[in-house]
Amino acid sequence: MRRAGGFLRDSSPAAAGWSAASGTAVAYWVNATGMPGPPPEYGSHPFLHPGGRVAWTKDRLEDAARTRLGGAKLIVVANREPYIHNLRDGAVELMRPAGGLTTALDPVMRACGGTWVAHGSGSADRLTADARGRVRVPPDDPTYTLRRVWLTPEQENGYYYGFANSSLWPLCHQVYHRPTFDPAHWAAYQEVNDLFAAAVLEEARGGPALVFVQDYHFALLPRLLKRARPDLVVAQFWHIPWPNPETFRVCPWAAELLDGMLGNDLLGFHTQYHCNNFLESVDRTVESRVCREGFSVTRGDRTTRVRPFPISVDPDFAGQYLAGDWEAPVAALRRRYGLGDRLLLLGVDRVDYTKGIPERLRAVARLLDLNPGLAGRFHLVQIGAPSRTNLPEYRALTDEIHGLAAGINERYGTPAWRPVVFVNEHAGPELIYPLYRSAAGCVVSSLHDGMNLVAKEFVTARDDEQGVLVLSEFTGAARELTDAVLVNPFDVDRLAAGLLAALTMPPAERQRRMRRMRAQVADHNIYRWAGTMLSEASKLVDHGPRPAAARVAAPRVYVPADDAALLTYPA
Ligand code: F6P
């Protein structure tokens, strides 16, 4: 037994080819090939791990949703819809958006059923939905309902591009990008939160419901829902970091945001550190009682529990893209960009200034300066999905990346070899998983990231137990994937050393690290995330008769921060 990454691990082979690794915080089993699974003596029980610990699977989540929700509706609210219909050349085309949230939550909804309320942003979304904006999804095997909310261009501009992505996004990510605060954006943010409240209340009519709100687009929604329907159980997961209180307090509407979030019964962040920051922010900003032992806040007569729930992915998802002739899309990409059979370093990101893409490119230049012998031996393939392109800083970043890639290729490349290939397109799982599986290494160099699911997806794709993950220590994922090559992306030498490690690490060392990371993600999967969060929230579901006072949300009225607890919403 030895201590590694904070856990006790036993690497001695056990009976029938299974080896056990157990620790105080986690316990998992891996078989002879490193695939996670139950040991033989537990094989007959679908959910059991050794020591009686229960594994989270899709089936167990389905089971939990059925028994724990006891008939209450599950309503997920997220700005981004999991399926977008667009018109292209006169035909309707289905698009799966890039971004961790939809990738993570779609399998949860497939397992649990219910309704997902989201902004209908596609050009053919109205065409494919009914009169109330509803469409059953996934389109090929419908298991849940997508309820689309229609926004005007002005609302989308003020709420999504404005307050959510020009104020809250830079405010919460400490990447030295100054947030802007525009009262018109704030007004649109309030208006759209009202609009979503009305849609959720309509979907929740007629019985108990658990509303699971996603992300920073809806800080005000929990309070709106509770005021209209105190019997609803409302939980929210904040998918991005929560900054320290000094940073947060510059927001002119800090108190209103906190008051809105304290409408939740349960509030989740990726890490304990973000929970601590949130409690600190509450303590300094609004009238409330903060309990640091029980990790909860009581404001007025309501209590919000605040807990870490590290999000993850479905470990089995990769399998469907790594069957049959899975190498064909990679071969096609190699031909398209003249990559030959050279080693690939891979980046997969939305083009966002939090992701550290320019830093990654500078590290490639540094790597070639320090190791001229690597010239002509590898490529950095950067898949960069266009994102939030209405915002000038995102367009400027795209230009910067194109410029950096061209400069590096000009300086270090030859007519037959371009070190950096920037694919500035949306790419689907049918290309990304084979790329993950083929790459020598995957580079995640975020400057600040709540979790980063690319890191976890990469690990799930490596059923060959090869491939090196180079991971920024400023991601939530770095706390779990301690066998990655951890780097500080602001330190060009360390990042270059990480890239070198990915190109040169001996196979046995790659296997040792990948095996552990795969076991971690297999156990701490998306079903565990959803299962534990929904189980905790569902304890609060009251299946009794609904209070007669229930009514739909009305326009909000703002009052000075410290009186916010007294705020009333006229019917
Ligand atoms: O996690 C933050 C987030 O905004 C998620 O909501 C989403 O998965 C991702 O970033 C992509 O962003 P957008 O929905 O703005 O394209």
Image (cartoon, rainbow, N blue to C red):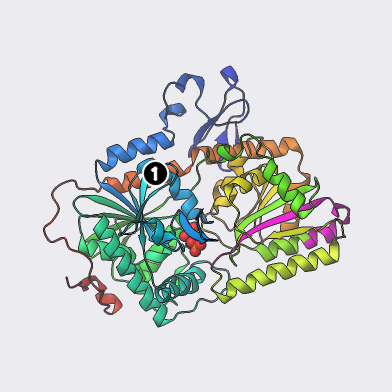
Query: Residue 240 colored magenta?
Result: no
Dot 1 lies on which element? loop
The reply to whether residue 482 is in sight is no
Question: The C terminus appears in which quarter of the rendering?
Answer: bottom left
Picture layout, residue 559 above or below residue 143: below
Say which quadrant the N terminus sits in: top right
Q: Residues within 10 Å of mark 1 (few under 14, many from 20)?
A: few
Q: Position of residue 317 (x, y in %)?
A: 53, 40
Residue 171 picture location, percent across and down: 49, 71
In x, y percent, where is residue 99?
A: 52, 56
Is residue 3 shown left or right of residue 135? right
The image position of residue 505, as x and y in percent, is 76, 43
Q: Residue furthest front?
A: 90
Q: Which residues are magenta?
A: 365-388
Identified at 42% across, 41% down, the residue is 141
In the depicted view, which residue is nearer to us: 277 or 428? Answer: 428
The residue sitting at 58% across, 38% down in the picture is: 518
Q: Residue beneath label 1, please?
A: 142
Name the residue: 51% across, 33% down.
Answer: 28
Quick check: can you spot residue 175? yes
